[in-house]
Image (tube, rainbow, N blue to C red):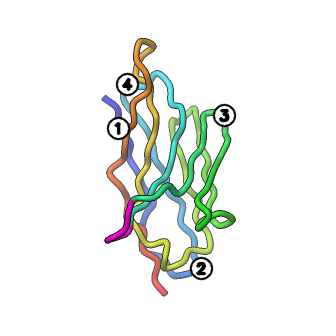
Amino acid sequence: QVQLVESGGGLVQAGGSLRLSCAASGSIFSINAMRWYRQAPGKQRELVAGITSGGSTNYADSVKGRFTISRDNAKNTVYLQMNSLKPEDTAVYYCNADVRRSYYYLDNDYWGQGTQVTVSS
């Protein structure tokens, strides 16, 4: 089994910061890309940031310059540092990872349960 568990969400005032963490555990052979998505009520889930196993990153235009994604491969953990938060950032944030469970299998897409981020004005 593979499990992704997010943490670090909460309530913060506009202009503040939060750091989200997502730890992968279980039967893991390797992890390729790791990503953060978010979904606000009534809106589609969107990709916020992604990072490859080699450390290459990409960001949504709406968060570029404010958010930073990073990973600790030894801990199978991905982080999202969120600075200068805006009310528009309010959403449930989901961790996503391409996990290879065995040498004999291709990567599968796994999701965390989500963590709520609320930014007040």
Amino acid carrying mark 2 in the image? Gly
Relative to 32, 111 lies left or right: left
CA–CA distance in space, label 4 to label 3:
21 Å
Mark 3: give few (<14), some (14-19) or many (20+) Cα within 10 Å: few
Tag 1: amino acid: Gln
Disc 3 marks a residue whose amino acid type is Gly
> What is the count of numbered marks?
4
Rendered image quadrant of residue 83: bottom right
Question: Whole-percent x and y of residue 51?
Answer: 60, 43
Q: Which residue is mark 1?
A: 3
**Cα distance, mark 1 to mark 3?**
22 Å
Q: Quadrant of residue 108?
A: top left
Q: Nearer the viewer, mark 1 or mark 3?
A: 3
Q: Residue at x 45, y 55 (%)?
A: 37
Q: Main secondary structure of the magenta part?
A: loop
Are the two marked residues, 2 and 4, in contact with CB atoms closer than 8 angstroms? no
Where's residue 18, x and y in %? 53, 66
Q: Earlier in the sequence, mark 2 or mark 1?
A: 1
Residue located beneath label 2 in the image = 15
Q: Nearer the viewer, residue 64 or 95?
A: 64
Task: Name the secondary structure under disc 4.
Answer: loop
Which span of residues is magenta-colored? 40-44
* Location of residue 64 with respect to 13 vertically, above or below: above
Mark closest to the chain's N terminus, 4 or 1 = 1
Residue position for label 4: 27
* Residue 76: percent from left, percent from top: 51, 36
> Residue 11 sits in which quadrant?
bottom left
- Look at the numbered discs 1 and 3 and tell me whether their residues touch, using CB distance below 8 Å: no
What residue is pinned by disc 3?
A: 54
User: Is residue 92 located in the magenta-colored stretch of the structure?
Assistant: no
- What SS does tag 1 mark? strand
Q: Mark 3 falls on what kind of element?
A: loop
